[in-house]
Amino acid sequence: MKKFTAVGDVRHVDRLIEEALRVKQAPLQHKMFHKTLGLVFFNPSLRTRMSTQKAAFNLGMDVMVLNIDKEGWKIEFRNGVVMNGDAQEHSRDAVKVMSQYCDVIGIRSFAKLADREDDYRETMLQQFIDHAEVPILSLESATRHPLQSLADLMTIKEQGLARPKVVLTWAPHPAALPQAVPNSFLEWITETEAEVHAAFPEAYALAPEFLKGVAVHHDQAEALKDADIVYAKNWSSYTDYGKTPAVSEDWTITSASMKLTNNGQFMHCLPIRCNVIASDAVIDRSLVYQQAKNREFAAQIVLQKLLQNG
Amino acid sequence: MKKFTAVGDVRHVDRLIEEALRVKQAPLQHKMFHKTLGLVFFNPSLRTRMSTQKAAFNLGMDVMVLNIDKEGWKIEFRNGVVMNGDAQEHSRDAVKVMSQYCDVIGIRSFAKLADREDDYRETMLQQFIDHAEVPILSLESATRHPLQSLADLMTIKEQGLARPKVVLTWAPHPAALPQAVPNSFLEWITETEAEVHAAFPEAYALAPEFLKGVAVHHDQAEALKDADIVYAKNWSSYTDYGKTPAVSEDWTITSASMKLTNNGQFMHCLPIRCNVIASDAVIDRSLVYQQAKNREFAAQIVLQKLLQNG
Amino acid sequence: MKKFTAVGDVRHVDRLIEEALRVKQAPLQHKMFHKTLGLVFFNPSLRTRMSTQKAAFNLGMDVMVLNIDKEGWKIEFRNGVVMNGDAQEHSRDAVKVMSQYCDVIGIRSFAKLADREDDYRETMLQQFIDHAEVPILSLESATRHPLQSLADLMTIKEQGLARPKVVLTWAPHPAALPQAVPNSFLEWITETEAEVHAAFPEAYALAPEFLKGVAVHHDQAEALKDADIVYAKNWSSYTDYGKTPAVSEDWTITSASMKLTNNGQFMHCLPIRCNVIASDAVIDRSLVYQQAKNREFAAQIVLQKLLQNG
């Protein structure tokens, strides 16, 4: 792989999942001694920050972390502008320079939720892809979170279900969130043998390209029926971009919701708003910590492949 | 040891001091290669941050640092609440996740000085103890600072005094500070053969459990008489919790104060407000840098024991 | 070397450049295994932060990064004051303590541009030099940026020009900047065989000590004539200290400016304000990324010499 930013960067999704699960069996490998990973954050990060560092340590790599907006300079990413405003450095220059000190660069840059075209163009991630001389690892971009999706698919694989019914469901949240996790989950899970459903209020339809091969429901209970996997996540509106239209039904996942399923398992990428996205009881009996643990091995196999360029 | 949060976690205090002093003789050991230390800060840190990292490097460990409130998510630590406010992640989830990527977690969480019961219940530290799957190392909690206390006792031991008279004295400070350092120093020093005194204005009595076996004075000069060790520290009121009642006498430690002692040595945990806690002249001829240096070896022996679970 | 803060700390500038270029041929050396580098930042940093870490990794060192004002304590650097204000720790104490945990300390402390004498006295850097027990590496101080200058001279050397005409030129910028980079560049380049010119508006004369051996111009076009190297940089006024007097001519470097030169190469230390300091077209065909890459090897040879104390 030359980059890891979307499912399309992966040749064989199933094989990658299997390789990641093999890494989990024996993670301390130290294959990449003397290689340097640069982690560049424009946004907060706990799981991604720690699991990716741990994965790099498992490979024997050195790691540099840069909270770029706090520790570096304010970044301009538009081309051709006269930089006499706040921004101190052009992303092109920052990327070219950083990539000279690293063997792989991981970059986190969330959707700003102001301008849909801008977010879906992945302006910042694309600057890294265009200008870096080394492989780029997405640590969540405006529209996708591929390391999360790979860990999610590992977790589902570990359940040992044949052709599981997987339901992605919207759930409430007090603030507007990007569509990166649901987009990404759908583009990955539809590459597997799973039967894929998505449930969301009508105002919360995702971008059409992510709903291909997905059975859509606007009635959560209907969607949950006989589900093996319930993947909850909040997101803001794609059509009325970044807005959070009121929803009259209660979309919080509770023990009662889970009773509709086929003894289904609850999943969420974390961080989760307890008793808003799902009740404490649901979270307590869920796969969320297993998903988080798998982030380490997802990052590790991907780092390995990026460094091997294979 | 399964955790290091209070003197009660240590079986033999004297033996631990001796072991730490032996580490000081030959710190580069690399016994813990491939082990990962996670350092989680809710509050500022210089000595603790650097000395604990150095200790881990001496052991050959990998280190991840997380300034959780700035780099991660806002944390909710109350159980059972509906998380529709500011907090983005529950401490239970954050701890469970972080502990999956680390072999030991160090956590710094100061007293907030608003609610005494809450602080003395050690709500945040307890979340780490309860939910982590790995040993927990306190980097200063609401009520204690055990790595500092161990380094302090090492420093006193290095003076080679038989049954020293040790005086903890309150000293002035422009802002309200927690009681963690004095509490901790007293609970550790009273485990040694030292004769332990504490001097503070009446309004500044520490919690009764920390004053067991301690001779209390409200007259600083009286307490300092024939002291071998003068340990100064400011703290806010325990009884009128977190407040800083006015004090009419001058409690700053000066060269004149030190003349009352038995050629006594001055100690402070740093950072110190010069010419407020103590005069420059006193600080210049003190043990403060030796205390700070010993923080490295205190952390190292404790990390080693936590990893060996012995 | 016992410190690396100005060209005067280096015995043979030409030899150091050659040694740095040899490091570039084979950077992975791991000569300094088990040595710890502490990087202390009072100001933002991208290139310096990453290139110096990478250099340390190349040498097999451990690295601790401290954004001191954000992660540590507020620092008082005046001696003898009563510390009852905002500052929580005296720089003397912070430095003595940090130097006990490190084998080399790198320190970044920019000019504040309020008090010229204070900035040119290098108050903060001097605290590190005075109180640290280990070698001090400047990561840019109030008046100099020696790692940048060394990388710049490496880059010029790589052009293979005999006695090049090197022109430092002032260029516009929307905010007031320190004089550290131009001061430093001049004190280093005048130690080489280059013919050194400096062009700036009259109000922007640098301190006299940095203009020794330098041909000064107030007409940029005249200065650029037949130049082999054009080094652009903005700085604020030294005479009207920290101010930015209006300049009527256009000092931005464009393709037209470069046509005046002897097929000259454009240099800048980055970050650069595109289309303010220089046009995109000039930056695109410049040496700026080569300069940035050389930062890694400049830091590496200097770290090596500081640790060898040779």
Image (cartoon, coloured by chain):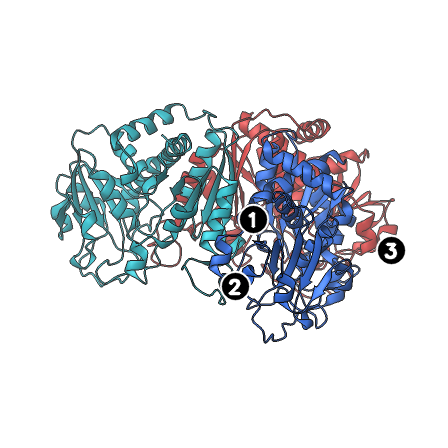
Chain colours: A red, B blue, C cyan
* Three-letter amino acid code of the residue under disc 2: Ala
> Do circles 3 and 1 both sit on a common chain?
no
Q: Are marks 3 and 1 in contact (CB under 8 Å)?
A: no
Camera-nearest label, 3 or 1: 1
Tell which subunit mark 1 falls on: B
Q: Quadrant of residue B241?
A: bottom right
Which amino acid is tagged 3? Answer: Ala
Determine the CA span between mark 3 and mark 1: 51 Å
Q: What distance separates the C-alpha of mark 1 from that of mark 2?
A: 29 Å
Q: Residues within 10 Å of mark 3 (few under 14, many from 20)?
A: few
Q: Which residue is mark 1?
A: B47
**Identity, as a three-letter code, of the amino acid under mark 1:** Arg
| Residue depicted at x 63% and y 34% | B23
Name the residue tied to disc 3. Answer: A256
Percent from the top left, x then y, of residue B303? 67, 39
Assign the C terminus of chain B to one quadrant of the image.
top right
- The residue wearing badge 2 is B256
In the displayed structure, does residue B245 sit left or right of residue C299?
A: right
Any part of residue B55 in sight: yes
